[in-house]
Amino acid sequence: MTLTEIRRILLIFRVKMSSSTSALLLPVGVRGMKSLDREKFTRNVTVPILKVSDEKLSKITQICKPYFLKLSNFKPVQSLQDMNGEIVTKCIYFDPVKVSKWLDISEDDRSSLKQQNIGEDNYETKEILLSYDNFKYDEIFKAVLPENEELVSGFSQIGHIIHLNLRDHLLDYRSLIGQVLIDKISTCRTVVNKSNIIDNTYRNFNMEVIAGEEDFLVTVKENRCNFQFDFSKVYWNPRLCKEHERILEFLRPGDILFDVFCGVGPFAVPAAKRKSRVFANDLNPESFKWLNHNAKQNKVNMNLFKSFNIDGKDFICNTLRDFIQDYCKGTEKIDKGAKIHITMNLPAMAVEFLKHFNGLIKDAELKDKFDCEILVYVYCFAIGEDPYAIAKKMVCENIGKDISDLITNVFDVRNVSPKKEMMRVTFKLTKEILFSNNKEEENSEPPIKRICASEQTD
């Protein structure tokens, strides 16, 4: 049995266990529903209750909290009225999964209740009416979607947009899934289903609006900056917020950042706000447009910020090269102790650009004048049993020499799929690499022209 099969069995087991714990409360008769009918979620359920007087309510609720019936839009403690509508006492509603009889309450809690003169005489059952409003989205999915199959296991939210990667067996339910998410998540106005395949140079996903407005203009807050962009035309992965933050923590005021594949600026804009000098590049014209918009919206000091809309190879071979040469010649200044950082967040193919560092500087006379520290953070997808070794090997092979002793860190950023990890390799870019004189002949076409058929999320 493969690891993938084991994970699937465990997932189904978790779904079964999760479903069984709330089976008494879940909607019935809605399995297989493909068009949302909210009325069909209405049902009567008999639940345990405890009648108590007002003066004892505070102490008794503290004892009974572990047994509360917790549903959306439902208060576990309510007033109980008589036939004339007058309030006669308070009623505590218990979860029937936890309590089906008086003795299901623990002996210690029953003893505490007895001290408040509360006993089995106060315990009875009551019928309540549940509706669509009482169920969370995951509970509705458990009741509706196919049994013994993976459910909607997760999603990302970018501004008002929720995006999903639905499995094939859920595609017939996509309209219902989207509408439920809009109903249940107050900040959601649009739900899209996105393909795992990125089918063009600019890393755009194919996407289908499955519910809500066809409005892709979003605003996202990250690392004390607001980012605006058209989600249908640029790439943004909310799962990388922590990774953006980790890299930003490495930068100090006066440091210099070259962001080779910057997107709309999750590294570049906050780095400039922290007084690092930034050179930011992206080939996608839409990313370039929103990068500059975000820099202005976040009041970046434009003396610290330069943006480029060119190929990554040209950015390395011209912009970065010229800066290093000018520094060696004394026409570019770097603060004492400052470092140059190079981020390469295009994990599907960033390593293929590493060869351009090898022998980047042709003027050998500048070699002795090079004295600054350069750190490269390159991202890649490692597929296999040992992602750390695989990532190291990919970096060495693509840069064209064994630089194992220059690699300072290999970090597992996130799991993409079984046996596929997004890795970050950090290494020092030294004069021995930059001024190498055995650079191999390069292909004239940069690797960005190729299309990766697997998931290319960053």
Image (cartoon, grey):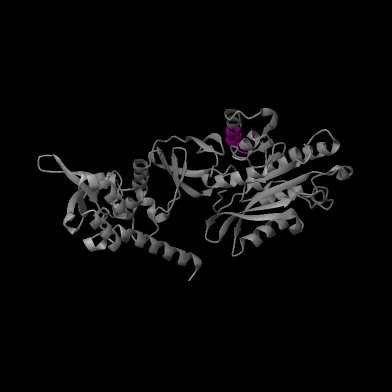
Instruction: Give the quarter of the image for residue 301.
Output: top right
Where residue 161 sits, quadrant-wise, is: top left
Looking at the picture, how far across and down is residue 329, in whole percent? 85, 36
Report the front residue among 119 and 105.
119
Horizontally, is 403 left or right of 245 in the view? right
Q: Nearer the viewer, residue 371 or 163?
A: 371
Residue sitting farthest toward the bottom: 1
Q: Is residue 161 above or below residue 392?
A: above
* Residue 262 sits above or below residue 95 on the image: above
* Residue found 55% across the figure and 49% down from its top: 457
The outermost residue toward the front is 115
* Residue at left offset 65%, top offset 58%: 391
Q: Nearer the viewer, residue 345 or 63?
A: 63
The residues colored magenta run: 283-291
The residue that appears at 35% across and 50% down in the rendered structure is: 173
Report if residue 396 is visible in the image: yes
Q: Is residue 289 magenta?
A: yes
**Farthest residue, direction right:** 365
| Residue 436 image offset from top left, x and y in percent | 83, 51
Residue 127 position in % (x across, y down): 17, 51
